[in-house]
Amino acid sequence: MDAANILRNRGLRVTKIRVAILEALGEGLQALPYGDLQKKLSQFDRTTIYRTLLALIDKGLIHKALEENNESYYALCSDCTSNLHNHNHVHFKCNECSSVQCLHISKEVGLSIPEIVIDSIEITAKGTCSTCLLTH
């Protein structure tokens, strides 16, 4: 991943913290909890990390995949812009190892309710991930 180029393409200055966050989230396929990001980025204070996460969300580079038990999980965006977060995927949390993944689905999920305009749908599924299924 070329984090510096990604930042420039979105009109953001390239800073050490922005690059570090994008690289940390790009290391694996799982969303990372804020606590883990703080540990990985211990050279930065937590306020700077939090403000940078908000800026990256605002520019459509990352999203909050899940918020549970006072812990926020963050993941890279794939098709988002600064104007629109477009997440046609399911957020999955494993009950065994607590990992959170963005699982892309082949069909777009839709919902229609009379006299209501729906702008977005967020789906969180919980169960056992494939890694835990193999080890149990």
Image (cartoon, rainbow, N blue to C red):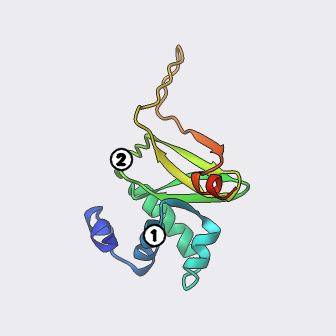
- Label at residue 74: none
**In x, y percent, where is residue 62?**
45, 58
Judging depth in this view, the residue of 39 and 7 nearest the camera is 39
Decide if residue 112 is on the left or right side of residue 38. left
Judging depth in this view, the residue of 55 and 68 nearest the camera is 68
Q: Residues within 10 Å of mark 2 (few under 14, many from 20)?
A: few
**In x, y percent, where is residue 24?**
48, 72
Q: Nearer the viewer, mark 2 or mark 1?
A: 1
- Label at residue 27: 1
Q: Which residue is mark 2?
A: 83
Query: How many numbered marks, from 0 up?
Result: 2
Quarter of the image for the N terminus: give it. bottom left
**In x, y percent, where is residue 73?**
59, 58
Judging depth in this view, the residue of 59 and 30 nearest the camera is 30
* Circle nearer the N terminus (2, 1): 1
- Residue at the spot x=66%, y=45% of the render? 127
The reply to whether discs 2 and 1 touch (Cβ–Cβ < 8 Å) is no
Q: Residues within 10 Å of mark 1 (few under 14, many from 20)?
A: few
Label 1 secondary element: loop
Quarter of the image for the C terminus: give it. bottom right
Label 2 secondary element: loop
Q: Find the distance from the CA under tag 2 to the CA under tag 1.
A: 26 Å
What amino acid is found at the position of numbered circle 1 in the picture? Glu
- Residue at the spot x=54%, y=59% of the render? 31
What amino acid is found at the position of numbered circle 2 in the picture? Asn
Say if 14 sits above or below 133 in the image. Answer: below
Question: Quick one: which residue is furthest to the bottom in this view?
Answer: 43
- Residue at the spot x=61%, y=78% of the render? 39
Say if 114 sits above or below 88 in the image. Answer: above
Question: Quick one: which residue is furthest to the right in this view?
Answer: 69
- Residue at the spot x=65%, y=48% of the render? 128
